[in-house]
Image (spheres, helix red, strand yellow):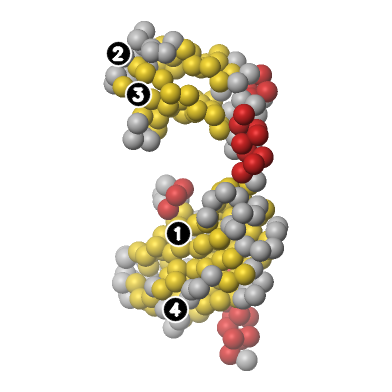
Amino acid sequence: MKKTLLSIALSSILASGFSQIELRDVHGGGTGLINGTEITVNGLSSDFEVVADIEAKNISGSTKTYKVKKREIFYGVSGMDNAICWSTCSPPVAYGSQPVLDSDPLALDNDSSAIFNGHVYIKNLHGPTKIRFVWFDVNDLNDTAYVDVVFDVANAASIEELSSKIELNVFPNPANSGVLNVNLDEQTINSNAVITVTDLLGKVITTIPANNTNTIVNTENFKSGVYFVSVQTNTNAIKTKKVIITN
């Protein structure tokens, strides 16, 4: 009976939108609030897991103790497991076997934050899974916040096939004139492709929309060294070429 009343109370409060806790997507830059929104985290069927990392910050003015409630909404394919980590980690469970689960409590001082992790274990499957995570003050059910997370797992084999169809040429290589030409096929151009140049450490140097079959990248301010030119389409297909720049 207590659990039923708690669920009703939480549903009522969620509708009001009152909250003294701020939620931010760690991988989304951590700048914008995601309270009451839906975010997507992506993975491949060849991955072990896909994880949503969410920062929760107490802005109430006093110390609060929060729990996180997991509420499964839908899944596109059965067989994946999920778990939550807040204070401690729950054991992985199959989707549908424990659709609602409360975490252990965690105390947050005013203006302090903690990171929540929502895990989906892929098990060589693909398809979307949607889970709602609700933060609530154990002593004040008027203080709640939620975010819906879509764990979107793509078929790795399909992505590899699509990636193999991308025609990417980068020249000159080595590049020493301050200009790098990125040549792409028409089909890739029509798939909202984006060109990204990264250095050896994985730092993104520049990102450019691929609007033409030949895109010119200005490399005058690049340091001499090895870079990677990647093209990603709206289907998540990726192809990468290595290039040497000598300025």
Kind of residue sitting beneath label 1? Ile
Q: For mark 1, what is the residue?
A: 54
Q: Is residue 38 visible?
A: no
Mark 2 or mark 1, which is nearer the start of the sequence? Answer: 1
Asked if labels 1 and 3 touch by Cβ distance under 8 angstroms, the answer is: no
Q: CA distance from mark 2 to mark 3?
A: 12 Å
Kind of residue sitting beneath label 3? Val
Between 172 and 143, the one nearer to me in the picture: 172
**On the rendered structure, is 102 left or right of 234?**
left
Instruction: Name the element at disc 2.
Output: loop
Asked if labels 1 and 4 touch by Cβ distance under 8 angstroms, the answer is: no
Q: Which label lies toward us, 2 or 3?
A: 3
Kind of residue sitting beneath label 4? Asp
Instruction: Name the element at disc 3.
Output: strand
Kind of residue sitting beneath label 2? Asn
Q: Residue furthest top?
A: 177
Instruction: Name the element at disc 4.
Output: loop
The circle on residue 80 is none
Between 219 and 66, the one nearer to me in the picture: 219
Q: For mark 2, what is the residue?
A: 247
Which quadrant: the N terminus? Answer: bottom right
Q: For mark 4, what is the residue?
A: 104
Residue at 52% over, 77% down: 102
Mark 1 or mark 3, which is nearer the start of the sequence? Answer: 1
